[in-house]
Amino acid sequence: MSEKEKPFIVNDRRKFTLEGELREPVEHTEETAKPTPEPPATTPTKEPAAGPRVVEFASKAPAASEAPAEPQAAASDDDLTDEEREEERAILASGPTEEEVAQSLQAYQATVDRLDTVMRATNPGGEHLPPMSFDRVVQSVYMTAMMQLGAGAQPGEQARVDLMGSRQSIDMLAILAEKTKGNLSEPESKLLESALFELRMAFLEITQVLARQAAAKQGAPGKPGGGPLGGGPLGSGPKIVS
């Protein structure tokens, strides 16, 4: 038994009892020893071998090689080299492969065929859309631009003009003409040129009418009306819509 674990023994060395009689000498035995309780341990004890060694993990600092690696921040465009930038552009410009394009086209066509079959079965006598062509593309954009310029107004109804929308539609046809130059048949080229000419002339005419209306309203103070390019009463002229 170590010195720490030895019991603390108290010996009564008085020669007389409380009544004044002579005390007989009593030999000390282990049974008469009164060990004092040991103070609580100030250091954590080790867990059993089978359990986790909490003290060792808490006190042991991780080595430099064991330290977890910090996540790397995503490299910004400024940190990329010229070769990496070119590689990124090549990946973005590569697009789908020929096999992917063929598969998507095949799946799309099969879905369209099933849809046509259902439409014919549910509406046998109805009209069906004709196949899409270059002429139909040009005509579709042309009609959209004309509606945006107020061509769809009924008699006596104030025309509503969307200048910004009509401008985009006209520019779409202009880009189509630029990108297909030299790859169109003569009828297709004539159709596109005629559509662009008519739309541009209609756009100029509408803007001139609106400018005259604005000038007339500025010269007649107190006359009810809209903004500088707004329309007047019903049927008096086109009205700008946002």
Image: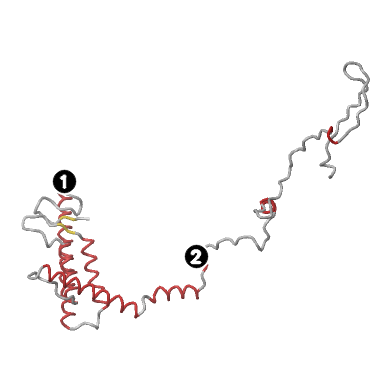
Task: Give the Cα distance between marks 1 and 2.
Answer: 59 Å
Is the residue marked by circle 1 packed among few (<14), some (14-19), or many (20+) residues within 10 Å? few
Question: Which comes before the other along the chain, label 1 or label 2?
Answer: 2
Residue identified by numbered label 1: 221
Residue identified by numbered label 2: 76
Q: Amino acid at mark 1?
A: Pro
The answer to whether marks 1 and 2 mark residues whose Cβ atoms lie closer than 8 Å is no
Q: Is residue 15 above or below residue 220?
A: above
Q: Amino acid at mark 2?
A: Ser
Dot 2 falls on a residue whose secondary structure is loop
119 with respect to 48 (left or right): left
Q: Is residue 12 above or below residue 169?
A: above
The image quadrant where one finds the C terminus is bottom left
Q: Which mark is residue 212?
A: none
Q: Position of residue 77 (x, y in %)?
A: 48, 67
Name the residue rendered at 50%, 65% in the picture.
76
The image quadrant where one finds the N terminus is top right
10 with respect to 112 (left or right): right
Q: 30 and 128: which one is in front?
A: 30
Q: Is residue 234 above or below residue 124?
A: above
Q: Position of residue 89 (x, y in %)?
A: 43, 74
